Image (tube, grey):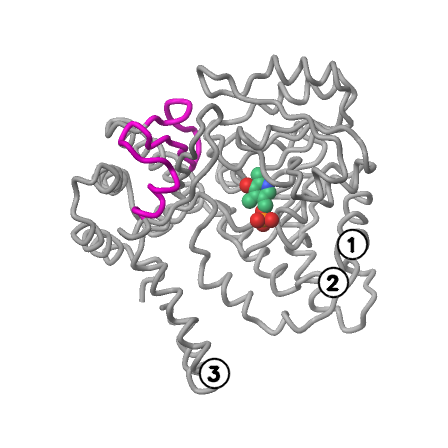
Amino acid sequence: MTVTHAPAADLLRRQDPELAEILLGEPARQSTTLQLNAAENFTSPAVLAALGSPLANKYAEGYPGARHHGGCEIVDVAERLAVTRARTLFGAGHANVQAHSGSSAVLAAYAALLRPGDTVLALGLAHGGHLTHGSPANFSGRWFDFAGYGVDPDTGLIDLDQVRALARARRPKAIVCGSISYPRHLDYAAFREIADETGAYLIADAAHPAGLVAGGAAPSPVPYAHVVCATTHKVLRGPRGGMILCGEELAERVDRAVFPFTQGGAQMNSVAAKAVAFGEAATPAFTTYAHQVVANARVLAAGLEAEGLTVTTGGTDTHLVAADPAPLGVDGRTARGRLGAAGMVLDCCALPHGTARGLRLGTAAVTTQGMGEQEMARIAGLLAGVLRGTADPARTREEVRELTAAFPPYPG
Ligand SMILES: *Cc1c(COP(=O)(O)O)cnc(C)c1O
């Protein structure tokens, strides 16, 4: 429990004990179990303070200086600050910081560049594409004609020859690069070359690596993609939300695609919290953090491989590790349940050429807590012990408790 939160918790305890229980229970869960979900992080008390501020009360449809509501003079300054910080952080000509989420950002990017029925190329869902990359259950699959490229069955690496061949054959209006589970850097220059050759827009969905890009620990898609979509809450460690980066020539199309096409009023508390996060991400401390995230993931990947799991692509360049626990005699779904019971929280993910699901882990949250390579090696051992059934679950749960107690996410 942070100092920042204590007054809010006290207030709720008095006014709404039922909800207070929940509000106190969740941070307790987060600080006593290992958060290995690759999409999560511990945002700072300053970001949480901005999120919980009365900016939440303000209606602000439109953009700074051109709002549909009165009284926007202060939130206008907040949004301009967020935009300027985002542009500087990522070296982008234009930034839209209003997208409510990563999916909203992708929806707006499609709205800016495409018409319903257009052909789009993206990493197939079974190979690590996101729902917004053509799932039939999502608007993307319903409104666009998606073709999926994949990864090489032997190396697990994206097959750029296949991307090129598909692009030549299908002549897509846009090519999407980005994934929920691909652990390697993307070759944005190669994607752009294919897009240029076939007359397509390149959309980078950098929801996962955006924070690594900000910290200089991963290559940037900004110089290559026509539009870059991102979340602000994954490695970037800001509030739950989305953002879009593009050149000035697409600025108006992107802005109009967010508001009024796909959204109403922006959440100004969230926009302010994004400004806080961008400010934090511009510090040397964040650069150190981003590199440590990758160093930790490398050790975690090596540890899991040494324990007998099959690590996709044989390792990682990022915060993300995808692994098949099948050699230890369990599928991903069973593994997630057993690990959850032992206090290790992570996700399942599709494995490109497997029938059962695998495991997806990430080091963004544990690195924010201050854990390093030594702790990653220990986590790999604990995890394998649980999956093999050689470790006593109660004993492992206790070790996880000790480990997390030594690295409180919100000290004090
Ligand atoms: C997380 C993610 C999104 C969606 O973000 P939400 O905020 O959950 O809507 C989109 N694309 C990719 C590649 C992601 O990893």
Q: Amino acid at mark 2?
A: Gly
Write down the residue under mark 3. Answer: 16
Q: Is residue 167 above or below residue 138?
A: above
Which residue is located at x 37 percent, y 46 percent? 36
Highlighted magenta segment, given as a residue range: 310-339
Q: Amino acid at mark 3?
A: Asp
Which residue is located at x 70 percent, y 37 percent? 141
Quote the CA–CA distance across marks 1 and 2. Answer: 8 Å
Q: Is residue 67 above or below residue 147?
A: below
Write down the residue under mark 2. Answer: 265
Which residue is located at x 70 percent, y 36 percent? 227
The disc at residue 275 is none
- In the rendered structure, the answer to whether residue 209 lies left or right of residue 292 reads right
Viewer-proximal residue among 227 and 175? 175
- Report which quarter residue 295 is drawn in: top left
Residue 147 at what x, y percent from top left?
68, 26
Mark 2 CB lies closer than 8 A to ligand 1? no
> Mark 3 or mark 2, which has the lower sequence index?
3
Q: Amino acid at mark 1?
A: Phe
Query: Does the CB distance between marks 1 and 2 fall below 8 Å?
Result: yes
Viewer-proximal residue among 338 and 177? 338
- Give the foreground label among 3 and 2: 3
> Mark 1 or mark 2, which has the lower sequence index?
1
Query: Does the CB distance between marks 3 and 2 fall below 8 Å?
Result: no
Residue that protrudes farthest toward the bottom in the picture = 14
The answer to whether residue 17 is visible is yes
Quote the CA–CA distance across marks 3 and 2. Answer: 28 Å
Write down the residue under mark 1. Answer: 259
> Mark 3 or mark 1, which has the lower sequence index?
3
Check disc 2 and report its element: helix, strand or loop. loop
Q: Quadrant of the N terminus?
A: bottom left
